Amino acid sequence: MESPKVERALISVSDKTGLTQFAQALTRLGVELYSTGGSRKALEDTGVPVRDVTDYTGFPEMMDGRLKTLHPKVHGGILQRRDNESDVAAAGEHGILPFELVVVNLYPFRETIAKPGVTVDEAIEKIDIGGPTMVRAAAKNHAFVTIASNPGQYDRILAEVEATGVTTPELRRALAGEAFAHTAGYDTAIAGYFAKLDATEADEHTPAELSVTVTKKSSLRYGENPHQAAALYVEADAGPHSLVNAQQLNGKELSYNNLLDLDAALGVARSLPSPGVAVLKHNNPCGAATADSVGEATRRAWDGDPVSAFGSILGYNAPVDAAAAECLAEPGKFVEAIVAPDFTPEALEILTTKPKWRSNVRLLKVGEVKPGGGALQLRAIDGGYLAQAADDMPDDESQWKVVTEAQPTDAQLAELRFAWAACRHVKSNAIVLSRDNALVGVGAGQMSRVDSVEISIRKAGERVAGSVLASDAFFPFDDSIHTAAAAGVKAFIQPGGSRNDEQVIAACNQHGLPMVLTGVRHFRH
């Protein structure tokens, strides 16, 4: 059967972006418009001729608008099959007019529950019933009906209707798929909200059923390697200050590996005191620092490991200023990408005009950078997913204990605090050495903890003298303590919990060095 000419459109939208222009264009093409409530009023206010659905059905809106489109003359007009004699006969018998175009998007449920202090009653009133029903009906009957569930689809639909008076089967099927994804995401948000309402502390992050809806934002050139296909997908409720919603101000398109490193850099920056800077290489911080100024923090973070920092990704928790930009633009330095709350005009000018890599460096403005909130993280494994609360919440320092005879000075305690904040972002087995609120040595991803200690000491060189050491998990033996003490480390922080804790503490006492046990492990696999 040929595609039906678009003669009638049913319009009921919450998001009225582009609606007037779309409706005016349809009217010029001779399409008769039917609408309800706020959509009808919005069209009438701009002079677009529209027929009230209640006049058509003969049934008034009631119950504060809860009941208006749930009527056989509405859904019969959407669901009737034009090539089915019984459907056509039933429609004729009951005065049901066919709708070839349905323009419907849903109540702003996600936006409502995102507001501070929203009540359950307020959230429930934003659960759309008639809208999803019309969307699903139109999508199901896409052989005859075009469904527009997003204002971004209006231009595609108009282009075809203006050209031929009909829409193609290919477009209708594509829009149906988008519509079902739209309602699935909507229901997922509602299910997630209700799961949290009655969740106990134990299952708050791990509900019995978990639905995830993401939308493809962009295709990537390739994944970790050139032979792997890849794309970026965005969660429906991704916040405005998340990486996926950052504004790219300069540079080439982002790669898969860029995005992984930028996410890690942003995570480190969120953990540091402000102004703080993290230098990332292959998903591990090779440098991090906090200082009195962004420029000084940048220089000291880079100097943590200048060799590894070449071609790195940087994360900031304060705006990049001219001093920071001048530091990065010095000869011999190369930066792949920077994510920061903002860039001053002077910094942007320097980074995009001065260094050799000026046209390639990706600069991302992410807005406010603040500590995370333990959101659910998913990780794919063969045949399923692992879920956990993100390890991005500050530790409760009231639980920290000094377990050695030597007590850390105030300066050492501040240094240990910085090292501990940075250590949680290094892949296990993780060891970091810090001095003057800057990383000077990092040992990551080793199968033996003492190997990580030795690597961090080698990386630090002469700077190891007077540094403090943070370990993401307990020391199984005292060999790491003796190795670090011999190199000049002056204090330690670690979770504790080993059966050999007493042996490890005794080693610190032997060297007259303080050790803090946090009671919290920060493995990162």
Image (tube, rainbow, N blue to C red):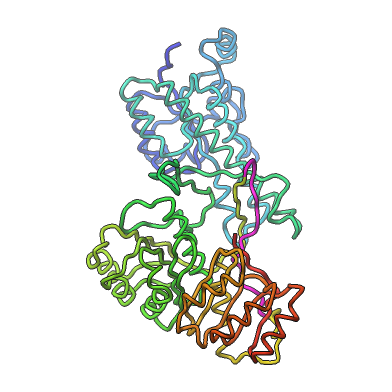
Reply yes or no: does residue 393 show up in magenta: yes
Image quadrant containing the N terminus: top left
Instruction: Look at the image and tell me whether residue 317 can be seen.
Output: no
Q: Is 183 included in the stretch rendered in magenta? A: no
The residue range painted magenta reads 382-397
208 vs 147: above or below = below
Q: Is residue 437 above or below residue 144?
A: below
Asked whether residue 85 appears in the rendered view, the answer is: yes
Horizontal arrangement in the rendering, residue 361 relative to residue 263 (left or right): left
Taking depth in this image into account, of 256 and 481 the one nearest to the observer is 481
Q: Is residue 508 left or right of residue 26?
A: right
Location of the C terminus (image quadrant): bottom right
Q: Is residue 117 above or below residue 475?
A: above
Q: For the image shown, how many numbered marks are present on the structure?
A: 0
Horizontal relation, residue 296 to residue 243: left or right:
left
Identify the residue shown where x is 36% and y is 63%. Answer: 311
Q: Nearer the viewer, residue 407 or 353?
A: 407
Residue shown at 53%/44% (left/top)?
214
Q: Nearer the viewer, residue 187 or 520?
A: 520
Counting from the top left corner in percent of width and height, residue 127 is at 62, 43
Vertical position of residue 324 compared to residue 413: above or below:
above
* Residue 281, horizontal then vertical, whole percent: 44, 63
Whole-percent x and y of residue 21? 35, 37
Residue 462: quarter of image? bottom left
Residue 239, image x and y in percent? 51, 57
